[in-house]
Image (cartoon, rainbow, N blue to C red):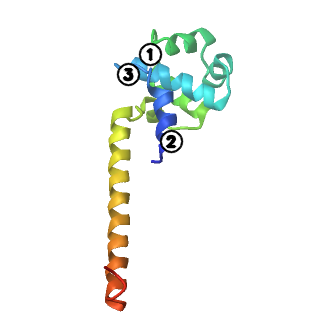
């Protein structure tokens, strides 16, 4: 993960409260609608439910049946389980980014040292 994708995931999810399945579904439903550029009304039409029902799901006041979940997911072109995906926390993303940076720094240091040692063996008088 690069710094830009970390930043984007942090900005997109820093205010999301993921305490239960209803909240997760509500947040992901809104996010998928935004990504797909469809309204609650259009999603309701595709899923065969009312616009009010979609709104209530997005407010965490209703929880759809498995059949409705599958129709909603199909409207987005995803699998139903993906409606419950929880993004990594900014803290865990930062830890992974930190580990990746440390690993890359170590690799660069090893490469530089190997080059210095290789050059020292070729020209021992030039390196002090």
Front of the two marks 2 and 3: 2
Residue identifier under label 2 = 5
Relative side of 98 to 33, left or right: left
Q: In this view, does 68 lie above or below 93?
A: above
Mark 2 or mark 1, which is nearer the start of the sequence?
2
Instruction: Note whether 26 is above or below 124 in the view shown.
Output: above
- Which residue position holds label 3? 18
Depth order, front residue of 23/110: 110
Residue 122 percent across, percent down from the top left: 36, 91
Q: Distance between the residues labelled 2 and 3?
A: 21 Å
Q: For label 3, count other residues whose C-alpha is less than 10 Å away and answer few (under 14), some (14-19) or many (20+).
A: some
Which mark, residue 89?
A: none
| Numbered disc in front, either 1 or 2 | 2
Q: Residue 63 carries which label?
A: 1
Along the viewing direction, whichever of 114 and 39 lies nearer the viewer: 114
Q: Where is residue 26 in the image (x, y as percent from the top left)?
A: 48, 19
Q: Badge 1 local density, few (<14 within 10 Å), some, or many (20+)? A: some
Looking at the image, which is closer to me, 99 or 22? 99
């Amino acid at each position: 993960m690069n710094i830009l994708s970390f930043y984007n995931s942090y900005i997109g999810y820093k205010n999301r409260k993921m305490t239960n399945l209803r909240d997760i579904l509500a947040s992901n439903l809104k996010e998928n609608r935004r990504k797909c550029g469809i309204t609650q009304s259009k999603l309701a039409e595709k899923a065969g439910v009312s616009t009010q029902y979609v709104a209530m799901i997005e407010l965490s006041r209703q929880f759809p049946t498995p059949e409705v979940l599958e129709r909603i997911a199909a409207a987005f072109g995803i699998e139903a389980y993906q409606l419950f995906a929880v993004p990594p926390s900014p803290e865990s993303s930062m830890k992974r980014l930190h580990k990746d940076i440390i690993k890359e720094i170590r690799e660069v240091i090893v490469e530089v040292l190997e080059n210095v040692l290789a050059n020292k063996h070729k020209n021992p008088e030039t390196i002090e």
